Image (cartoon, rainbow, N blue to C red):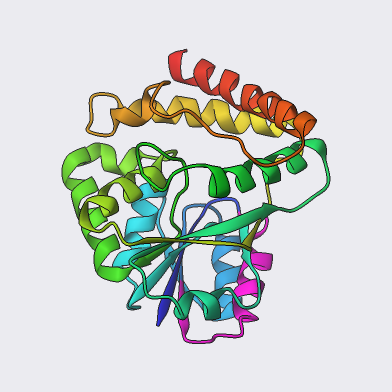
Amino acid sequence: MISIEIPAIHGKYLRQVLESIRNQSYQDYEVIVVNSGSGEISDIVKEFGFKVINQKTKSLHARYLAHKESKGEYALVLDETRMLERDTLKILSSLDYDMIIIGEKEIGDSLWIKLASLDKENVVYCNPVDPLKGISLPRYYKREVLSKAFSSALENLGNKFYDVVYRDLEIIFYEAYKVSKSVHVVYDQLISHFGDATLSDIMKKYYRYGKTSRVLRNTPYSVFLTKKRVRRKICRGSFWERKLLYLLYLARGIPYLLGYYL
C-alpha cells in the first residue's frame, strides 16, 4: 500500500488534489491530511473519506505526524497544491527503489508559470541527484527510509523541528540519503503544481521562505543556507528562455534574502 501524506493549511486546491488521487488507476493507497488551517479543510477531506489530523503546526512536523499515522510500505510526500496524473501511483508501485524523484509541471499560462515549469524541467534533467550538490527532491520513499530520516531530523533539530516550514523536503532527503543511495528519477511529468501566477505571489512566498529559514541557523542543516552550496545548472529551453529563467530566480531570490536578513 502507498501512503499519501499531505500537510494542508490553505485548502484552495485541496479538492482538486484529492479528486486526482481518487481517480487513480492504482487503488491500493491511503491518504492522511494534516490540517493546520480551517475547519473547511477537514470537511473536504472527510467528504472524500480520507483521514484527517487537525493540528496547528508547521510543514516538517505536519509531514512527520502524517507519516506516524500511515501504514503503507511506501509514502508519497505530497502537498495541497500538487495533483497526480491518473497512472502516477501505478507507475510508482511498479518501481523498486528507496526514493523516487518525480517530474512536475506547472498549471497555468502566465509568464511566471511558464518559467517555473521550465525551471522544474531543468531541475530534473540538468542537476545531480544529491542532497548537497543538486536540487532535485524525492517525493516517493520506502517507509523505513523515511521513518529513519524523520527520526534523525527530530534528534538534530530538537524543538526547532516544530518550526521548520521551508527546506523541509531538503532536510528529509538529506537524512534519507545517509540511509540509502537508492534514488531513481521518473522524468515523466506525473505531478501538476498550482504555482504562483503573479510576481506579487512569488515575492510574498519567498519572503516568507526566507524569514522561516532562519530557524535552521546553528543547526546541522545550516548548510542549506549558504549561497554557494550548489551552482544551479540549466540545460533545457531556448537561448532566450534560459535567459528569462534568471528573471524568475531574481524574483525569488531577492525577497528570500530580504526575509532572511531583515
Rendered view: 87 above or below 101:
below
Q: Is residue 57 visible?
A: no
125, above or below 203, in the image: below
Q: Which residues are magenta?
A: 11-31
Tell me where residue 80 appears, x and y as whole percent. Answer: 57, 57
Task: Please indicate, yes or no, whether residue 124 appears anywhere in the rendered image.
Answer: yes
Q: Residue furthest left?
A: 155
Quarter of the figure with residue 184: bottom left
User: In which quadrant will I find the N terminus?
Assistant: bottom left
Tell me if 52 is positioned left or right of 233 in this view. Answer: left
Residue 57 is left or right of residue 9, and the answer is: left
Quarter occupied by residue 32: bottom left
Asked if residue 197 is among those painted magenta in the image, a careful observer would answer no
Task: Check the image and report above or below for 39 versus 163.
Answer: below
Residue at 33 percent of width and 44 percent of height: 171
Between 46 and 175, the residue placed more toward the observer is 175
Q: Position of residue 118 (x, y in %)?
A: 69, 43
- Residue found at x 65% / y 71%: 85
Q: Residue 242, position in %: x, y?
A: 71, 31
| For residue 224, side relative to residue 219 (left or right) | right
